[in-house]
Image (cartoon, helix red, strand yellow):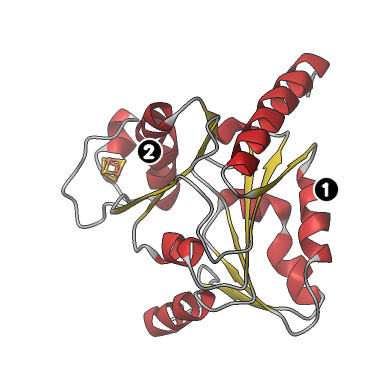
């Protein structure tokens, strides 16, 4: 990344962190995905249960294998080979995990988090339950306000996630949301965090790299 881009990522990232802190979240800016992975690994001890929301950002941190290698019980419902029943069991267990890790679809410069889910399991675990919650996001997820957050979801995050998942929904043809009625619609639960949830230990890490959708 060029110096000018690094400056931009850091300037926006630190501004978003300051706004998140005002809203009660712990917030950290880190230059790289590897720094964020190291920080997360330092929170984990052998035997700890770690739930993970589906996230391209978490995948790029390569955190699942690393934590498993440390002896953590990683609750990853996207793991290959799970039956539908096993998947449900893992998603339920995530709700009471020791640590829940997630990406985020958009973070506003007013310190808000915006996410869209198909099943709602990720936003449920983000909202209440795990003993500790950590959200990781590349600086590309930063937007000015909720209006831009909604635009980002409709024009970028949801169409790209639909394409990645091969849903065949209208946005996979036009590249933009059509507010579809498909059974395979992945945008069913919309979640806005205006402030840190009351009973949660909640940290947001913004990374100075473009990660995920
Ligand atoms: S609502 Fe439908 S068309 Fe819009 S992004 Fe979601 S899946 Fe695509």
Q: Secondary structure at mark 1?
A: helix
Q: CA distance from mark 2 to mark 1?
A: 29 Å
Q: Residue at x 74, y 27 (%)?
A: 10
In the displayed structure image, the side of residue 107 where residue 86 appears, left or right: left
Ligand 1 near label 2 (Cβ, under 8 Å)? yes
Q: Which residue is mark 2?
A: 159
Task: Residue 9: tell me if it is visible.
Answer: yes
Q: Residue at x 57, y 51 (%)?
A: 103
Coordinates of residue 25 in the picture (x, y in percent): 62, 50
User: Which of these two is toward me, 30 or 195?
Assistant: 195
Asked if residue 96 is positioned above or below residue 62 in the image, the reply reads below
Check disc 1: other Cα within 10 Å, few if <14, some if 14-19, many if 20+: some
User: Which of these two is toward me, 176 or 99?
Assistant: 99
Asked if residue 212 is positioned above or below residue 118 in the image, the reply reads above
Q: Which residue is mark 1?
A: 35
Task: Residue 210: tell me if it is visible.
Answer: no
Q: Secondary structure at mark 2?
A: helix
| Among numbered discs 2 and 1, the one appearing first in the sequence | 1
- Residue 87: which numbered mark, if any? none
């Amino acid at each position: 990344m060029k110096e000018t881009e690094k400056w931009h990522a850091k300037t926006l990232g630190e501004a978003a962190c300051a706004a998140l802190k005002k809203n009660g979240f712990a917030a950290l800016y880190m230059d790289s995905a590897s720094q964020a992975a190291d920080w997360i690994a330092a929170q984990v001890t052998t035997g700890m249960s770690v739930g993970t929301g589906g996230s391209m950002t978490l995948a790029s941190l390569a955190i699942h294998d690393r934590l498993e290698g440390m002896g953590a019980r990683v609750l990853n419902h996207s793991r290959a080979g799970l039956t539908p029943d096993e998947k449900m069991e893992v998603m339920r267990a995530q709700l009471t995990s020791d640590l829940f890790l997630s990406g985020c679809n958009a973070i506003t410069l007013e310190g808000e988090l915006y996410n869209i889910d198909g099943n709602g399991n990720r936003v449920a675990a983000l909202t209440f339950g795990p003993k500790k919650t950590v959200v990781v996001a590349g600086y590309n997820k930063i937007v000015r306000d909720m209006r831009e957050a909604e635009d980002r979801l409709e024009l970028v995050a949801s169409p790209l996630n639909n394409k990645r998942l091969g849903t065949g929904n209208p946005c996979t043809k036009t590249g933009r949301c059509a507010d579809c009625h498909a059974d395979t619609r992945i945008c069913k639960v919309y979640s806005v965090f205006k402030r840190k949830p009351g009973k949660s230990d909640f940290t947001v890490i913004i990374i100075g790299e473009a990660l995920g959708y």
